Image: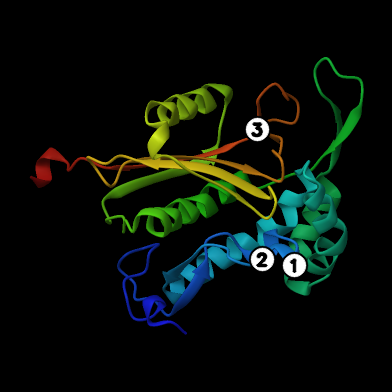
Amino acid sequence: MSKKYKAKPCVYCVTGISAAPDHVFAREFFLKHQRNNLPKVRACEACNNKKSALETYLTIILPFGGRHADAIDNLTTQVPRRLAHRANATTSIQLRDGQRQISEPGQTPIVTSFPIEGEKIGQLFQFIVRGLMWHHWQVLLRPDTEVWAGCLTERGLNAHRSLLAQHERRCVSRSLGDGTFIYVGQRRTDDLDISVSLFSIYGGIKFASDQQNTNKISLFIGGVTRRVPPHPASQ
C-alpha cells in the first residue's frame, strides 16, 4: 500500500487516522471493465465502514432508476447477486413490496417506481464531496465546515448551475465509466472551504419525493460546502 494512504488524517472526517485507500465512487457502481483509474483518497476505518454500508444499499437501488445502458447491464448482471446475499434481505423485501405502477403527468406510459431511503443519497454524497475536494484540490475540509448533499429541485438545480457558471474556467468536469457518473465541481480560491458540485448518475435517475406528485422530480444531485460562522457565544 502506498504511504500516501496510510497513517494520515482521514479525508472524510479529518480527526481519524487513515488505514487504507478508499474509492470515492464505489467500484460496484461500475461495470467490471470500467473500474480502472477511479479517484481514491485516504480513509479511516470508521468512515470506510459507514460509507461502505451506504454504498452496499445504493449500488442495489440506484440501477433500478437509471437510463444509462450500463445501469441496465448492472441491473441484470450485478444486482441479482447482491440481492441474493442474506445481508440484503431487508432491501430485497422493500423493493418487492414497495414498487408501484404510476403514470407521469402528461404522459401515457405507465412506469414502475421503487422506494428509496433518500437520506442515504445525501449521506453518501457528503462523503463523495469531501473526497473530491481532496482528490482535485488537496483541500482537507476542517471540522467546522458544513457539507450538504442531496437531490435537487428545479430551483436548486438552477442555483447550482448559476454558481458554477460564475467561475466556469475554474470548474473540474469528469465522466467516469463512460457516463456512469458525470460531475462538475468548483471551489472558491479566496476561501478553500467553499465549493459547489453537480452530479448525474446512470444518465439521470428520476427521484420523486412523493409517488403521488411526480411533478417534484429530480434528475441531479448537488453538493455544497461552506464554513459555519462561529456562534457569538463561543467567540
Find disc 1 in the rendering and name its residue.
Answer: 32
Find disc 2 in the rendering and name its residue.
Answer: 35
Residue 99, by quadrant, is: top right
Q: Nearer the viewer, residue 83 or 204?
A: 204
The CA span between labels 3 and 2 is 31 Å
| Disc ID at residue 209 | 3
Residue 93, by quadrant, is: bottom right
Give the mark toward the camera: 3 or 1. 1
Query: Would you place residue 80 above or below residue 212 in this image?
Result: below
Q: Nearer the viewer, residue 162 or 43?
A: 162
SS class, disc 1? helix
At a point 24% along the width and 42% down the height, the residue shown is: 191
Judge from the rendering whether residue 47 lies leftward or rightward of residue 207; answer left or right: left
Give the mark toward the camera: 3 or 2. 2
Alpha-carbon neighbours of circle 1 within 10 Å: few (<14), some, or many (≥20)?
few
Answer whether labels 3 and 1 touch (C-beta < 8 Å): no
The CA span between labels 1 and 2 is 6 Å
**x%, y% of residue 34?**
70, 62
SS class, disc 3? loop
Query: Would you place residue 108 above or below residue 35 in this image?
Result: above
Judge from the rendering whether residue 45 lies leftward or rightward of residue 103; answer left or right: left
The numbered mark, 3 or 2, whose residue comes first in the sequence reads 2
The CA span between labels 3 and 1 is 32 Å
SS class, disc 2? loop
At a point 76% along the width and 43% down the height, the residue shown is: 65
